[in-house]
Image (cartoon, rainbow, N blue to C red):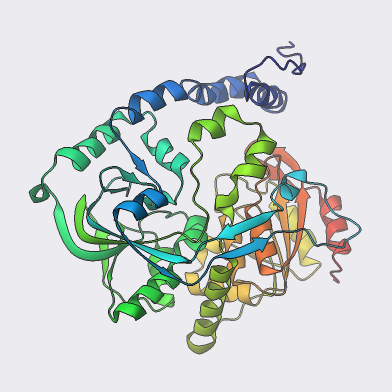
Amino acid sequence: MILFESNISDTTLFPGMKTFFSRAVRKYKRDGFLELIKKSGEEAKKIPGPLLYEYYFLKGIRMKSRDCIEGESESIEYGKEHEFTLVNDSDHTYIEQIPELDWVNKNYSFGPHKIFIIDDAILEHSNNLILSDGIIIESCLARKDMVERKLLFNTSLVKKIKKLDENVSSEDLTQIDSAVSLCDGMGYSKWILKGLPRLETIDLYQQNNGKKFNIILPENPPDYVTQSLKYFGYDNEIIQLEKSTIISECIIPMHRSPEHLMSYYDHSIKNDLQSRVKNHLDYKMVDPRSIQWLHEEAQDKLSSEYEFETPNRFFISREDTSEREVVNRQEVYNKLEEYGFKKVVLSEMEFEKQVSLFLNAEFIIGAHGAGLSNLVFAEDCTVVELFGEKIKPTYYMLSKIKGLDYEPVKFEEFGNDIRIDINKLDKKISYIGLQD
């Protein structure tokens, strides 16, 4: 049964529809009709987005950018502006042709370290949003689209925010005198690339004030969050957010990435893939100065306080995940053993051991995933990132910031996972000069 004829050249389709149709064709051919119907239900939620946007956001909820906060609250700066040009400077003769990675090669601008101080801000408990006559975008990874995703189809959250921000009295909330909020970005990659670089800004602020500030984290934060704060010497009092709280002096360290003010609906509907990648992925870049600071801090702590024996060649197995698994990982591992690789399961390691593992790495092979954010701690190593159909440039960008030898390889997608062509992988390993 033929459901689709793949003729999608009609330019009268509204922006983004060709992308949707192409994805539907690929989904049907790869996974079958039932999976297509399931996915279609998810995609359908994106279509009424502009109407929902008008309903939610034109009914009194403001979203406040950095410029808006700075105009209404106190802010303190440290350091200077900085620019960094991302280039693919590889001189290799055999390179996997993945154009999505080249699209992010351009010049990036970074501001100085900045602290925002907001009086009587409200920290909302369930989604960790900071409110002060509107939603502070900086409290959601400095991404407007992430704020919108939290509110989309969540009328109870919208009502709660309006109630907290407009009508509630201070007697209804837990109260804290002064604290730094690090509540956003609890996923591993987000914490490593967005959360930890802000410690440098907190350091500068505490040094200039001569005192330590309480740090607010979400209720029951992941172990790697508390372990990493301890590792970097943050013995500040940690406050876990158990209910919505009013903070008399809310200290917000600015993220060390460019602010992202593009709407979620522009992501979903209005732009083709290349336009989104080339023009709207600046938020994935982290200030190279902060990456270097984090690396040096981690290295100093490891040499003075922690000692581990870790392999210098390893394969990140991802057997502990539910997506982007390598379905033939045992076959892959058998081949990599010939080259002296060891298999590692990162979720079974405490934070400090992961730091040691990447600091001492010579060769790293792994499918795209959060564990590769540990490349922050690596130096002078080769990284082979394994992709399925979907390409994300996060760790390409990080590798180039770090000056690592980065090698992407694209393989067959197998549902949400990938299947590795052993011959292709073997050619890549031979190409990068590994000896068995």
Tell me: residue 416, above or below residue 387.
Answer: above
Point out the image quarter for the C terminus.
Answer: bottom right
Residue 315 can be seen in this image: no
Which residue is depicted at the point 59% across and 67% down? 288
Give coordinates of residue 429: x percent, y percent. Answer: 83, 62
Q: In the figure, 332 relative to 80: above or below?
A: above
Q: Nearer the viewer, residue 429 or 257?
A: 257
The spot of residue 141 in percent (x, y) is 44, 52
Q: Is residue 271 left or right of residue 297?
A: right
Q: From the viewer's side, name the closer residue of 364 and 404.
A: 404
Q: Residue furthest bottom?
A: 304
The answer to which image quadrant residue 431 occupies is: bottom right
**Does 404 sit above or below residue 43?**
below
In the picture, the quarter occupied by the N terminus is: top right
Looking at this view, name the residue that lies furthest to the left.
171
In the rendered image, the residue lying farthest to the right is 93
Q: In the figure, is residue 385 to the left or right of 162?
A: right
Query: How many numbered tags mark residues here?
Result: 0
Q: Is residue 233 in sight in this rendering?
A: yes
| Residue located at (66% from left, 16% from top) | 13
Above-or-below relation of 10 to 340: above
Q: Is residue 162 left or right of residue 3?
A: left
Q: Nearer the viewer, residue 377 or 139?
A: 139
- Residue at x-position 45% and y-position 24%: 50
Question: In the rendered view, does 373 fall on the left or right side of 158?
Answer: right
Residue 18 rendering spot, x and y as whole percentages: 68, 22
Task: State the image quarter where residue 57 is shown.
Answer: top left
